Image: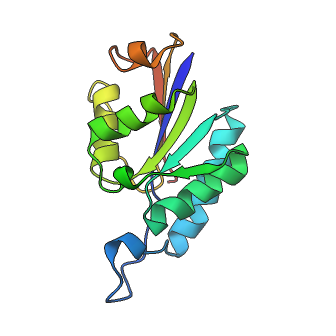
Amino acid sequence: MTRLVLVRHAKSDWGEPGIDDHDRPLNARGMKDAPVMARRLAALGFRAEAILSSTALRAVTTADYFSGALDVPVEQQKRLYGAPAKTLLRAAAERDARSVVVVAHHPGIAVLASELSGGAIGHMPTCAVALFEWEADSWDVATAVDPDRWELQTPR
């Protein structure tokens, strides 16, 4: 089985002027939602082999909560910052693990979730978690056909 979890980073802080977009931290809601969603994914019995994250502070902080809940280290990748859907899927496939979590940004993460769900996922709110499963044990198959199952979890 091949599994992909897409996580949109948790809610970030826009309040401090002069902070570069890449360096924006999570706000209070983001700090509350990220551990809740990480524990929820772990409670579903999901076992990750890899967690890939954008290098942006808000994504890395979100990924760290998932790392703690799933007991898997975070692998930061610069190419995931602001990446389009195709790049996010390619990064997961190139990692060549059977179960990969990708923590990244809107709109790429939402576009990929929409594509993989046949348009059923129209929006990925902050800290949303979309889980996709293919019966095949191959990313070549997973990147070529629709998933066999999927679900969307949101913090609200």
- Please say if 11 is above or below 50: below
- Seen from the viewer's position, the closer of residues 105 and 88 is 88
Q: In this rendering, would 102 be left or right of 64?
A: left
| Residue found 28% across the figure and 24% down from its top | 118
The location of residue 38, given as percent across then percent down, is 63, 49
Q: In this rendering, would 71 be left or right of 54?
A: right
Judged from this view, the residue extending furthest toward the bottom is 17
- Seen from the viewer's position, the closer of residues 69 and 49 is 49
| Residue found 26% across the figure and 44% down from its top | 84
Residue 13 in sight in this render? yes
The location of residue 138, given as percent across then percent down, is 49, 14
- Please say if 108 is above or below 117: below
- Seen from the viewer's position, the closer of residues 141 and 9 is 141
| Residue found 71% across the figure and 53% down from its top | 68
Please say which color scheme the image uses.
rainbow
Q: In this rendering, would 81 be left or right of 5?
A: left
Residue 122 in sight in this render? no
- Please say if 5 is above or below 18: above
Q: Quadrant of the N terminus?
A: top right
| Residue found 68% across the figure and 48% down from its top | 39
Disc tally is 0
Q: Quadrant of residue 116?
A: top left
